[in-house]
Amino acid sequence: MPSRDTHRRADAAHNREAILTAALTALTESDEASLNSIAKQAGVANATLYRHFPSRESLILAVYRQEVEQVVETAEALLAQNPPVQALSEWVDRLARYAMTKHGLADALRAATSSDPLFAQTYQSIVGALESLLTAAQEAGQIRRDLDPNDVILALAGLWELDPRGDWQAQAKRLFSIVFNGLRG
């Protein structure tokens, strides 16, 4: 029979996930979503939310880190299933979709990440995922060998400036076409 501590840890993990899910939904819709409304949407008391996330910034950063982990993990899975250039293309497409679904969270993220030392580490994981995709495509002779993943990320940064209420998919496709042509040389 599970101990009382095991049950509490499982309950705490469940609450944390519920809070992160609710926060992602609420903050994507509006970067001004209140912590009270997030707690209510998660089905937890305010005290439970604050026990897990003592500040708004800590909650926003936790949501960001969780989402970035998913984007990063996708790179290896795509490489395992596709030729390198196709994996790179699909990853950038997913990155664009990620940027559009998180558009409402952009201002809150900028404010929260500006003072967080772990932001650089999280950013580096994105660069690392891109680097593995670029390296595979370079080794296959499909793109130039003189590319720096940080430069490519900067070139792709325009994805975060697209308007999700407009025809962002066509615009993202044109943006990536320009970048991709540069990758090929």
Image (tube, grey):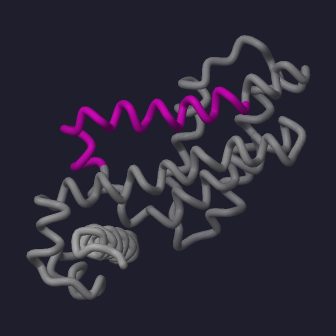
Task: Looking at this view, name the residue that lies furthest to the front.
Answer: 1
- Residue at 79% over, 41% down: 79
Near-viewer residue (171 or 13): 13
Expressed as whole percent of the image width and height from the top left, the position of residue 61 reads 29, 52
Q: Is residue 159 left or right of residue 14?
A: right
- Residue at 39% over, 73% down: 21
Q: Is residue 29 left or right of residue 96?
A: left
Q: Is residue 50 left or right of residue 83?
A: left
Q: Do we see residue 161 in this rendering?
A: yes
Give the quadrant of residue 156: top right
- Residue at 66% over, 55% down: 94
Compared to 44, does 166 lie above or below?
A: above
The kind of secondary structure the magenta stretch mainly shows is helix
Compared to 9, does 45 lie above or below?
A: below
Near-viewer residue (126 or 153): 126
Expressed as whole percent of the image width and height from the top left, the position of residue 163 reads 51, 63
Give the quadrant of residue 62: bottom left
- Looking at the rendering, the stretch of residues picked out in magenta corresponds to 110-133
Q: Is residue 159 magenta?
A: no
Near-viewer residue (69 or 99): 69
User: Where, quadrant-wise, is the C terminus in this rendering?
Assistant: top right
Expressed as whole percent of the image width and height from the top left, the position of residue 152 reads 61, 29
Expressed as whole percent of the image width and height from the top left, the position of residue 15 reads 29, 75
User: Where, quadrant-wise, is the N terminus in this rendering?
Assistant: bottom left
Q: Is residue 41 left or right of residue 128?
A: left
- Residue at 55% over, 54% down: 70
Compared to 40, does 5 lie above or below?
A: above
Q: Is residue 123 magenta?
A: yes
